[in-house]
Amino acid sequence: MKGGVFPRFVKALRRDWAVRFSGITPMERSHGRALPKTSTFSAGWEPPDGRRLFLNLQHHSKSWHVGCFTVNVVVALTDTPPDPAPQPTEDFWRKRAGWYRLGSLLHGDDKWWALLPTHPLPTRLSWEPRSYQDEDAVFREAIEDVSGDVGRLLLRIERDAAEQGDEADEC
């Protein structure tokens, strides 16, 4: 196998998301070191307010957590993302530009995925496969879990936008 587990996983995820999510595409270029095109996706413009959403898979910086990653949801008001600085979760729902963690937005706590066995896991809310014996199976399970969370986030954003549209129609 060529390359590390994280780049191999991102390649598998790209192939899956090309079919699963028509509105999510790999980045065409990097936006600084914080949003490399190799592990960042554009989730497009969110109608009707025009926010730009980026999904960034961030691998863990500690050598004892090799194979662990989290997902940053980056909200920009232009084509250029804001500087990487974590924002309070409630700011995301108030449609403010910033960096947010997918796990915090959906589950109320940071979530990390472990593609390789690592202990202790980075956070209380961590994902692990049923078994680490088969890398393809690990990738399939991780893709299903990450995609499920991303799908739930996009659905909630859509629902919130529709509710706001309904409120505007009532005025």
Image: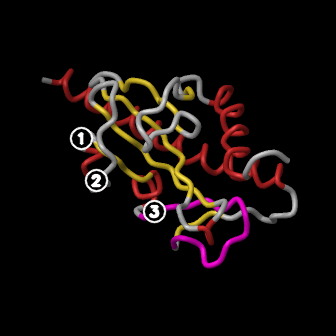
**What are the residue bounds of the magenta stretch?**
109-123
Q: Which of marks 1 and 2 is nearer the N terminus?
A: 2
Q: Main secondary structure of the magenta part?
A: loop
- Residue occupied by mark 1: 96
Report crowding for label 1: few under 14, some 14 to 19, many 20 or more residues within 10 A (C-alpha): some
User: Identity of the amino acid at label 2?
Assistant: Gln
Residue 143: x and y in percent read: 68, 46
User: Is 120 in the magenta?
Assistant: yes
User: Identity of the amino acid at label 3?
Assistant: Asp
Report crowding for label 3: few under 14, some 14 to 19, many 20 or more residues within 10 A (C-alpha): many
User: Identity of the amino acid at label 1?
Assistant: Arg
Seen as rendered, the residue at the extreme left is 171
User: Is 22 in the magenta?
Assistant: no
Q: Residue 87 carries which label?
A: 2
- Residue occupied by mark 3: 110
Residue 144: x and y in percent read: 68, 47
Q: In this view, does 137 lie to the left or right of 127?
A: right
